[in-house]
Image (spheres, rainbow, N blue to C red):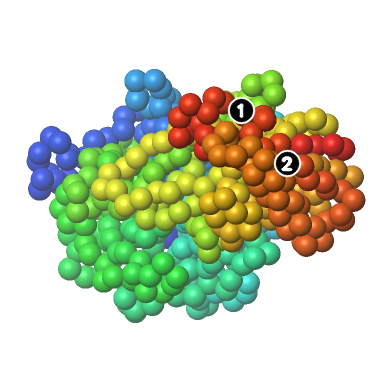
Amino acid sequence: MKKTLFSALFLASHILYAQEDSSSLYQHQNLGPNINSTSTELTPRISADGKMMFYVRDGHPENKNQQDIWHSERDSLGNWMPAKRADDKINQLDANCVWSVNADGNTLLIRGAYNEGKYVGKGFSLTRMTKEGWTDPQMLFIDEIEKVNLGINDGAYLSNDGNAIIFTMCNKKKCTLYDLFVSTQKEDGSFTKPVKLGATINTEQYNEFAPFLASDNKTLYFSSDRPNGLGMTDVYKTERLSDTSWLSWSVPVNMGPHVNTASKDAYYVTDAKGEYAYMVSDLNSMGSADIIAFKLKEEHKPKPVALYDGKIYNAKTKEQILNATIEYKIYPDNSDEGVGHTDHETGQYKIILPFGHNYSVDVFAEGFVPEYDTITVGAKNEYTEITRDYYLVPIEVGQSIKLNHIYFETSKYELLPESYYELDKVVKLLHENPKMKIEIEGHTDNQGNPEKNQLLSENRAKAVMNYIVSKGIAADRITSKGFGMTKPIVGNDTAENRQLNRRVEFTILQK
């Protein structure tokens, strides 16, 4: 079999080498026999929470192919459990590989183009773990990739939000040198034609390969055999200089002797926390190459991010919903959309949100009214984990749903533009359920004149109704009613409680 470029980098020779930084705090540590074997371990990929690892074993006696995908989970003490070979659905090729893992560890970008689970040629495909196992891999549609991906080998890394892919490819026939390319997702879900990242990243006479885009969506790590490195291949770090462009990067910096050795260093990855890195090394390995881990120095870490996790519940029964979808976007420009899913066993979702943005979060599950939220992730200097649960109201007659982000000026009933986003979601819900009829209900707190509060609640409910009708919903499907201060949901004893009572809801009259 012809080895891939990247596995070949680790199958040549072993070089005994003592790491220059001998501090035990930052020392390279072999992950041991639960991960490594007397065969060759390649391409580690870590879930955002650092609890799941996928990687390749080359030539392992339990493989069914030359290179198969294996995986391991951490136990409650943080130790890696004995690795298991992944099932045949994602191990169909002679050289299988996981290129990237999404935030929750359940969606993989793998080598090969598949259609309905059958291999059809070179390319890249997605598969997701469900209660029935891995879904049939399905290829990504990438414009003109057959004109760009002309080399024997390739590689990729999909950003956590799924909006960009960094490729290792060669766009010349019979090529021996590889560069990094980028492709971005279009509105229809396909991807643009890959273009080179440019001369700041790529060299003319040397290889750039093994890209890893950190959770911040800004920091890119890759390997290269360019001159003036410490070994045969070194790991480099660069940062994206623009939120809107994938072609503007800082000059790559060699990660230095803390990371790189006199041998071959590649397949560098971190989890979302960015405290530890993992990569492949052939120094003092159990086989031809092993996966190692080491603690990162501050200058090597990516920018901090927030890991949001939680569970989705049925608001009526308080039971978990195991098949919910979470969509998130930078708000209000709706850029960098990402998608998360609840775990098929635990019901937990996990999404990564880079700092410095406001996000809209939409939670969906079949048979339930979607939940809409906004999250502000301010500028912070350290990784943060935040738990946020959501309660979805079942689509049933009589169920009431609070609209959390409807805004009016004080004591007035003209809708403010900030309300439109959530109201547009109600419009979408009504379009998707063409028989549904609802009543918009306005409520106030107990402050002020009761008659004025009654009139204000009526006018606010009517304003919401008129907006929805203006978006194409038939007027006979929606009514409005004001209740003033007669139906508080909590006591009016504090400012916070009074704010809760000042609300707009809708009740399902017919589904």
Label 1: which secondary element: loop
Quarter in which the C terminus is drawn: top right
Residue 270 rendering spot, x and y as whole percentages: 34, 45
244 vs 400, left or right, is: left
Real-space CA distance between mark 2 and mark 1, rounded to the nearest whole angstrom: 15 Å
Check disc 1 and report the residue beneath it: 489
Residue 326 rendering spot, x and y as whole percentages: 59, 43
Let me know if residue 198 appears in the view: yes
177 vs 98, left or right, is: left
Check disc 2 and report the residue beneath it: 482
Q: Residue at x 45, y 34 (%)?
A: 495
| Residue 455 vs residue 203, the one in the foreground | 455
* Image mark for residue 79: none
Residue 42 sits above or below residue 344 on the image: below
Q: Amino acid at mark 1?
A: Ile
Q: Residue at x 59, y 43 (%)?
A: 404
Residue 221 sits above or below residue 390 on the image: below
Let me know if residue 343 appears in the view: no
Q: Residue at x 40, y 49 (%)?
A: 377
Q: Quadrant of residue 283?
A: top left
Q: Quadrant of residue 312?
A: top right
Q: Amino acid at mark 2?
A: Gly
Residue 408 rendering spot, x and y as whole percentages: 58, 53
82 vs 18, left or right, is: right
- Marks 2, 1: nearer the viewer: 2
Among numbered discs 2 and 1, the one appearing first in the sequence: 2
Badge 2: few (under 14), some or many (20 or more) residues near its Cα, within 10 Å?
many
Badge 1: few (under 14), some or many (20 or more) residues near its Cα, within 10 Å?
some
Q: Residue at x 80, y 58 (%)?
A: 469
Residue 58 rendering spot, x and y as whole percentages: 45, 43
Residue 412 sits above or below residue 182 on the image: above
214 vs 422, left or right, is: left
